[in-house]
Image: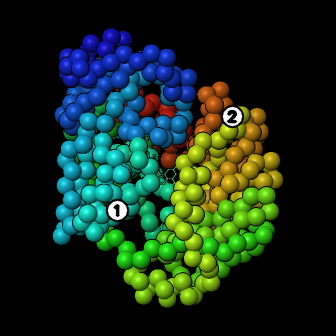
Amino acid sequence: MSLAVFERVLGAEYVRTVDEERLDGVPIIGEVRPGTSEEVAACLRVATEEGQALLACGGGSKLAWGNTPDASTLVRLSLSRLDHPFELDAAEGFATAGVGISLARLREGASALGKCTLLDGPHERATVGGSVAADAFGATINRDRRLRDELLGLQVALPCGSLARAGGRVVKNVTGYDLVRLHCGAYGTLGVITDVTLRLRPIPEQRSILTRRVSSTDEAFRLAGELGESRVEPAGAAVRFRDGDGFLAWVLEGSEAGVRARAARFEGEIAEARVWEEIDEILASVPPDGCARLRVLGRPSDTETLWRWLEGIGGKPAVALPLVGLVFGDLVEEAVPDAVGAARASGTAVFVEHASPPLKGRIDVFGPAPDTTPLMRALKTRFDPNRVLAPGRLVGRV
Ligand SMILES: Cc1cc2nc3c(=O)[nH]c(=O)nc-3n(C[C@H](O)[C@H](O)[C@H](O)COP(=O)(O)OP(=O)(O)OC[C@H]3O[C@@H](n4cnc5c(N)ncnc54)[C@H](O)[C@@H]3O)c2cc1C
């Protein structure tokens, strides 16, 4: 396909040929960089007319997540120029940001007003749009901190070339179907998000990291269970254990007096912020060559079982987030198809975050197609009939 069709929409300056780049083995032949929502929509219309698959790209830090694209070539739709609007309204408690704005810039802007958002992730490169599309999270997560619950509204460009706005700027604004959350975690398979409105929250007066050293995983998960049942209400908790040594760490956020009172309810050593940053770095790292990175999911009370399951099949669990029932770790690639098949047969959910293209070609990285797959396929067909938006990348290769 000739990229000239995109040049007619954007001008030659914002269209370029790409050589020798691949995503999961699929060649990326070009890159287009629209500067407005309207231009994003125009690129989608052209792609639909030409039958050219597109891959939306923010910071590009999580492009490894998802199934192998079902396309012979891809054009990368970079959202780096979409840095308008950027409006922070501290009084009304919302931020509206173009999707190309980095999480770092959002964090700086909000913190200058004494505010923060759940999108204040540590990743300099990551963007607002990529984080919403991938339903991103870090180690500071618990059952009440869901990104999709913080989204008030968004605008999305659709493959037919139109723009649609869902939600608004107030907390209760959805009448009818909740189309805002539909795009959160859709990996850009239904539309390309162009701006997002989300809640601003006050920066907690106090943030403390506490740890307890442990000499066995038994001890770590016993303590994690006690922490979960206590009235400490951590913003996040993590178990890190390697070579006979490890710790349980947790984060307390709130007023100074509240954090002090909650810290007193469950004994721990005050630790430096770096301890928590290292957990985030482990979550953001990629596995060594020959290994796949697995994210094993269950109920919070299953976390220890999930850890032991990963160990039992020869994997190396690195971090567990016991408040949400998540274990991250690596497994040699040859062992992945059988292990993942067996896990899924026993009801354990496994998401393969990183793997080589040959392995990704053999498995659905999200797990077995759920009962809702026909409904998801119908949605995909309705939104994207020519399958130009990241085709095949979602669960069930939708
Ligand atoms: C509070 C917080 C903490 C975090 N902590 C961690 C951590 O500890 N470890 C970690 O690994 N990650 C963490 N993340 C996630 C990290 O920030 C990711 O890098 C981020 O989710 C991806 O952003 P990106 O711009 O690089 O997305 P990309 O990699 O560019 O895109 C991600 C996906 O979204 C699609 N996409 C991108 N932009 C759009 C758009 N505008 N419309 C539709 N689809 C789009 C892409 O096609 C791709 O499928 C955290 C995120 C947050 C919010």
Badge 1 or badge 2: first in the primary sequence: 1
Secondary element under disc 1, as helix, strand or loop, is loop
* Image quadrant where residue 385 sits: top left
> Is 346 left, or right, of 380 in this rendering?
right
Residue sitting at 51 percent across and 27 percent down? 23
Does any portion of residue 323 appear in the rendered image?
Answer: no
Give the percent coordinates (x, y) of residue 331.
73, 43
The span from disc 1 to disc 2 (Cα, nearest Å) is 35 Å
Vertically, is 118 above or below 29? below
Residue sitting at 80 percent across and 47 percent down? 314
Q: Which mark is residue 289?
A: 2
Residue sitting at 54 percent across and 48 percent down? 284
Q: Amino acid at mark 2?
A: Asp
* Image quadrant where residue 368 sits: top right
Nearest the viewer among 115 and 271 is: 271
Q: Judge the density around disc 2: few (<14), some (14-19), many (≥20) Cα neighbours within 10 Å.
A: few
Give the percent coordinates (x, y) of residue 265.
57, 88
Vertically, is 223 above or below 154? below
Residue sitting at 78 percent across and 54 percent down? 311
The residue singled out by tag 1 in the image is 117
CB of residue at label 1: within 8 Å of ligand 1?
A: no
Give the percent coordinates (x, y) of residue 206.
42, 77
Q: Amino acid at mark 1?
A: Thr
Does any portion of residue 210 appear in the rendered image?
Answer: yes
**Quadrant location, the N terminus:** top left
Secondary element under disc 2, as helix, strand or loop, is loop
